[in-house]
Image: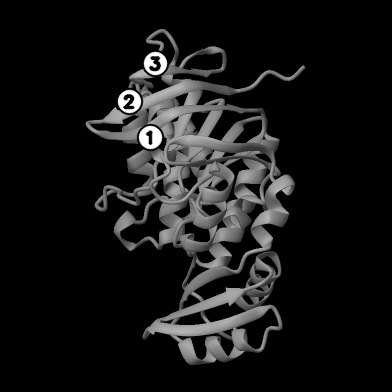
Amino acid sequence: MTRPVVVATAATKRYGEVLGLNGFSAEFGPGITGLIGPNGAGKSTFFRVLAGQLHLDAGTMTLLDRPADDPVRSNHEVGYCPESPTLYEWMTPEEFLRTLLRLDGFEASEARRRCQNALGEVDLLPVKDRRLSGFSRGMRQRVKIAQALAHEPSVLLLDEPLNALDPIGRVRLLELFGRIAEAGRHLIVSSHVLYEVERLTDQIVMMTNGRAIAQGDLHQIRDLIDSRPHTVELTTPQPRELGRTLAGWEHVTDVAFPRPDTVVAQTRTPDEFYRSLGELARSGTIAVQGVRGVDDNLEAVFRLLAG
């Protein structure tokens, strides 16, 4: 029987009167598991506990059969890619990774080797000497993933790694995550957009208000979510052209223009919408700079599952 990589049992974390984790109980198996929940569900708190940045107030959480806050456990077992896009703008990717590796205790020669390997894994070696200040959002995400990989951890924690990326950037990162998993590492990938995670894995944990409300095979709840309209917000320098294109898709039921650079579409079949959007992005006829699933409709599903 395959042993779980992470087990949380009644895990509770308080921020004063606010509960970041509220009796969170779930298991995360080998390979890739998606952690799905609306913004504010507690996903980042969960990751920070696993990464050793926070301590639980009650309950337990284990990583590879040992407590997440066990001082004996090597922090090299987990790599953490936080949601924040902040980087040291004046550094190059190579300088950034080598500095972090040296701070983590690696000798200069070993830090250099690991830096080269990590940048190679995320396809950033050709730009390793460019300043981070000139990097796009997608390139910054790959730098963050490289720093999480550089010390060669067994478990990789990725907090909203696809947030605000353009469709091409999303595809490239999804392919990267697949390669990392094939190399034998375990990944927990959080998102508030179910259809992003579906491209990676069918194993998910759904959470809201600091609690797990469902886990297992996402296809068991897919019909429930697909029965509700889904709203997608797109950023583009060509809003009218994009709006006309989306309005012509049979599965799109409404198109709105809340801001000069934004198109909001509602679709009956989200999977078909995202597939069509990927084809549109690859065609290059209309520039789509950002895609965001709007939480409101998924919130209704979370409330329903929470009973």
In the image: residue 129, left or right of residue 302: left
* Amino acid bearing label 2: Leu
Position in image of residue 147 (x %, y %): 42, 38
User: Badge 3, how many Cα within 10 Å: few under 14, some, many 20+?
Assistant: many
Position in image of residue 269 (x %, y %): 69, 69
Q: Earlier in the sequence, mark 1 or mark 3?
A: 1
Q: CA distance from mark 1 to mark 3?
A: 14 Å
Q: Which residue is mark 2?
A: 54
Q: Residue furthest front?
A: 307
Q: CA distance from mark 2 to mark 1?
A: 8 Å
Q: Residue 69: which disc?
A: 3
Name the element at disc 1.
helix
Q: Which residue is mark 1?
A: 45
Position in image of residue 182 (x %, y %): 70, 37
- Can residue 297 be seen at all in this image of the molecule? yes
In the image: residue 76, left or right of residue 129: right
Q: Residue furthest left?
A: 16
Q: Which part of the image, by quadrant, shows the N terminus?
A: top right
Of residue 220 and residue 194, the one placed in the foreground of this image is 220
Q: Looking at the image, which residue is at 71% across and 69% down?
A: 272
* Amino acid bearing label 3: Asp
* Amino acid bearing label 1: Thr
Report how many numbered discs are placed on residues in the image: 3
Q: Earlier in the sequence, mark 2 or mark 1?
A: 1
Name the element at disc 3.
loop
